[in-house]
Image (cartoon, rainbow, N blue to C red):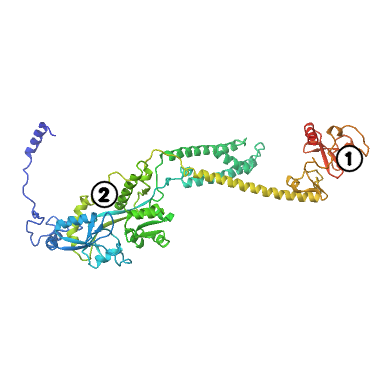
Amino acid sequence: MATGIELLLAAALCAACPPPNGSLPANLILLGEDGGPSTELPIDLDTTDAGVDEDIGEETLETIISKKPKLHEMREWIGGKHLRIATLEDFPLSYTELLENGTRIGHGVSFQIIDFLKKKFNFTYEVFVPQENIIGSPKDFDRSLIEMVNSSVVHLAAAFIPSLSDQRSFVYYSTTTLDEGEWIMVMQRPRESASGSGLLAPFEFWVWILILVSLLAVGPIIYVLIILRNRLTGDGQQTPYSLGHCAWFVYGALMKQGSTLSPIADSTRLLFATWWIFITILTSFYTANLTAFLTLSKFTLPYNTVNDILAKNKHFVSMRGGGVEYAIRTTNESLSMLNRMIQNNYAVFSDETNDTYNLLNYVESNGYVFVRDRPAINIMLYQDYLYRKSISFSDEKVHCPFAMAKEPFLKKKRTFAYPIGSNLSQLFDPELLNLVESGIVKHLSSKDLPSAEICPQDLGGTERQLRNGDLMMTYYIMLAGFATALAVFSTELVFRYVNSRQEANKWARHGIGRTPNGQSVAPSRWLRGWRRLDSGHGQLLGASTHNQNVTPPPPYQSIFNGGSHGDGDPLNRWRRPLGHGNAIGTGVLLGGDSESGVRRLINGRDYLVFRTPNGQSQLVPVRSPSAALFQYSYTE
């Protein structure tokens, strides 16, 4: 508020101002109370003289003046006129009710607008619906709304009709756009967010691919660099690790298991340290992001755009003869790329006008995505929410089993439609424009909905308990690990069997206990399992001699003590040498009596070798611990 000093100062400054000009500009058109010009225009008045630019885009002064008597005549003509109005069953924007006397009454936003025009222009009307509840197109023209309007059976179509290119040659759309229709996808609410499932959520797909590639490539790279370094430097201190050791080092570092490898060379140490640092940073990021995902992650849906439906070949359902179907079937429309999904039976167009039936039958029972315009989706989800809340009062997940995508599936301007050549558009469109610009049409579309969003995409629950879906990747890893271990075990059995067959052939060629160079070898454990000593005896190699008619060797002490050397003494057969004299086979005579056997060094241990009556070589250990075990096995 200005103070007194400021007012006095303003009055002093304006004292020298010229008096205001009360005259109006020349050639100014004055409008009367009825909106028409109160002054007569000169016959040769030019638009520039009237203050109207010649380059103005739409309505010029002449068109405004020429429309005035025409609109006045139309007002007089429509007063008391009975109009025939067609509509569609498209709740809540337009729907009808059939009374007992056969009269059909229109409801919804469309007929609230029609009732306003009825009071404005003083006409009456009756409602008609097409034989099929479809908008119609050149390829789907019979019994449609477009056919009724095109054949002038009705004066106008009072419905929110999407402005499609193919229909423009059959009807005239009103110049006033009622709204920009948005068709939204509604689907079953998934239990897990589409941003990731459990253990794979922290990283994107390509991050996991690069981690796998590095895991497979770093081991061979380290192996090649170590070999190259040793060859270039000639260093013999650094052991060139095998490829398997390098690969297991890389895997063990990833699993935080460490390694038994201890490189000496500085360059090799840097290679190992580089991989350790990389793994440390990677696992730190993974742990932090996994914690954030399980507690604070934003919930997203698996199908948000048309591209998601197309890429994943997801089944979807929409209204038969609606804007979505014609936008797909029309070549030059935005959804024409979905036409092949109709051919592959991924798209269903339902004849049922009850949205709740489509929601329960297709979405809840079969997992389809339901595409519907936004006002119908909001009303449908709100009614479903009220019903489910009466069943379960506290569980929010029971209240909202469905979720609505954020991105529109289709956007189209929607208008009323008139027959071609009809002049009702000139009379009604200005009034429709006033309703749209004042926000009345938008208010009527959402007046029955609460101000809060019903069943938002993210329910915003604070609790976050781990479910089986979060741990599913853990189960897959365990199954893969056990399957891999089983495959490796089977491979080991196959190689063991092949190796045993090779040893069996070698024993068959060179005799029991002999190799091609004459050294003593032990038979394979596999071979001992089925090979017998000869065809006349059933004793298996390595089998126990207890409870069998096999003479055991003498006590260990008696082998190295003197005794009777008579041929009748049973101990003499344990004192026979393997040959005559000192040249006994190919063994090394380390000392001792030649009749007491041959002392040989086998696998780093001392043994006395005797020949049994059946020709088998018998080994008697000389070392004290082994001798004790030998004595125990034959005396207990």
Tell me: residue 605, above or below residue 437: above
State the quadrant of the C terminus: top right
Q: Secondary structure at mark 1?
A: helix
Q: Which sits in the foreground, 542 or 201?
A: 542
Quick check: 416 left or right of 553?
Answer: left
Q: Nearer the viewer, residue 182 or 217?
A: 182
Q: Quadrant of the N terminus?
A: top left
Q: Is residue 449 left or right of residue 36?
A: right
Residue 240 percent location from the top left of the image: 65, 40
Q: How many residues crowd mark 1 within 10 Å: few (<14), some (14–19), many (20+)?
A: some
Query: Residue at position x 7%, y 39% from top?
Result: 16
Q: Please say whether residue 137 is visible from this viewpoint.
A: yes
Q: Residue furthest front?
A: 100
- Apparent side of residue 572 relative to residue 270 in the rendered image (left or right): right
- Residue 352 locus on image (x, y percent): 33, 59
Residue 46 falls in image quadrant: bottom left
Write down the residue under mark 2.
Answer: 446
Q: Which residue is mark 1?
A: 573
| Residue 415 in sight in this render | no
- Given contact means CB atoms under 8 Å apart, are the residues at marks 1 and 2 in contact? no
Q: Quadrant of residue 333?
A: bottom left
Image position, residue 292 (x, y; %): 43, 38
- Residue at the (26%, 62%) spot, across then down: 129
Give the CA distance from mark 1 to mark 2: 112 Å
Left or right of 551, for residue 259:
left
- Residue 12 location, quadrant: top left
Q: Horizontal and vertical percent for residue 201?
A: 46, 43
Tag 2: amino acid: Ser
Point 10% across, 31% down: residue: 5
Regarding mark 2 in the picture, which secondary structure is present there?
helix
N-terminal label among 1 and 2: 2
Residue type, mark 1 in image: Arg
